[in-house]
Amino acid sequence: MYHSKITGLGFYVPDNIVTNDDLSKKIDTTDEWIQERTGIQRRRHIIRGEDTTTSMGVKAAEIAIERSGLAKEDIDFVIFATLSPDYYFPGPGVLVQRDLGLKTVGALDVRNQCSGFVYAVSIADQYIKTGMYKNILVIGSEVHSTGLDMTTRGRGVSVIFGDGAGAAVLSREEDLTKGILSTHLHSEGQHAEELIVKAPGMGQRWVTDIIADNNPEDESYYPYMNGQFVFKNAVVRFSEVINEGLQANNLQVSDIDMLIPHQANLRISQFIQQKFQLSDDQVYNNIMDYGNTTAASIPIALTEAWEKGKIKEGDTVVLAAFGSGFTWGSVIIKW
Ligand code: UT7
């Protein structure tokens, strides 16, 4: 039995910065509304032809692998979390294997939206614990900008999401007091339709129906979110799953050195911070700069926090996510 630890982190965001004022030129919205309701000031959008979910993931992964001190040949497995794959199939995991020139290692795609990175880390942790793999590359990457309804109709959702990628290398750790102490995953599919992109799917609306309809008013390709309902569930589930992780390890709230919450809404993070009575130094937020990048948000924030020296050896780091599904989860790490 082993533990796994994070040995390399990296992130990549496109150069193209889109401010709230930029959005207000296309959509009936204001910088004031967006900042007040979400905390977001700007986000990144890819430039057509320059980046994709996979290419951003590859760029983040290259940095993470280099920082881990490993060679590409040392990577035993790839896990890629995204809700915005380049292709409907195959998923981006195999494209990373190709584009990074990895050995013919296994490549797994995770589809758990905002909780995707936490789910992916949990899977990687299990493979490393059992001794099956030694070094696993975990990526969260998203391109939202090409799939949003950039009209006033879609404003409740389209101002929130941004593009970007983050990656981590998880490696075997023999000291069982270090690394990932536990992971906790949950779902409640009863609320699947409260935050959803319906098409293209093979369920109620067949692709052949969509093509036959050829309807420019078809909204099934755009994300739908019942914002207030999602918000109310998020604050409850974030709290529960952080407590669950702490209790499983006999830790107290005061033991948390750094909480990296999924960057869904600054108001959600602030609510959690207040509820757990954490200081500004104990919670890392960067939604102001990148918006909500779903599966990429935790690895981007974790990398930034680590780059800024806010995470040190011996720290107790908590990752927590909630999102579409509903799915939620936490990871407790002794750094
Ligand atoms: O990452 C996965 C998990 N996601 C989340 O946890 C997100 C949770 N939800 C939220 O963050 C918030 O619900 C939103 C930021 C999405 C929305 O904020 P809200 O305070 O819940 O606003 P609302 O949807 O209740 O809308 C309030 C008003 C409405 O107008 P009326 O009906 O009061 O006249 C909306 O039409 O704000 C209007 N509105 C906007 N106005 C300007 C909605 N979007 C916009 C906009 N600009 N972009």
Image: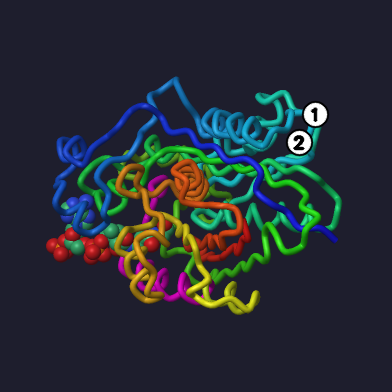
The first of marks 1 and 2 along the sequence is 2
Q: In which quarter of the image is the C terminus?
A: bottom right
For the magenta stretch, what is the residue range? 220-241
Residue behind mark 2 = 75
Residue at 69% from the left image edge and 33% from the top image edge: 69
20 up-or-down from 181: above or below:
above
Assign the magenta stretch its main secondary structure: helix
Residue at 45% from the left image edge and 59% from the top image edge: 261
**What kind of element bears circle 1?**
loop
Judge the density around disc 1: few (<14), some (14-19), many (≥20) Cα neighbours within 10 Å: some
334 up-or-down from 276: above or below:
above
Asked whether the residues under the numbered discs 1 and 2 touch, taking CB atoms below 8 Å apart as contact, a structural biologist would say yes
The percent position of residue 118, horizontal first and vertical second, equals 58, 57
The percent position of residue 327, horizontal first and vertical second, equals 54, 64
Horizontal placement of 205 versus 180: left or right? left
Amino acid type for the residue under numbered disc 2: Ile
Number of the front mark, 1 or 2? 2
Residue 49 seen in the figure? yes
Q: Which of 156 and 310 is in front in this view?
A: 310
Q: Quadrant of residue 93?
A: top right
Residue at 23% from the left image edge and 37% from the top image edge: 19
Q: Nearer the viewer, residue 248 or 294?
A: 248
Amino acid type for the residue under numbered disc 1: Lys
The percent position of residue 81, horizontal first and vertical second, equals 59, 46
Residue at 45% from the left image edge and 38% from the top image edge: 164
5 up-or-down from 184: above or below:
above
Residue 103: numbered disc: 1
Marks 1 and 2, how far apart at CA: 8 Å
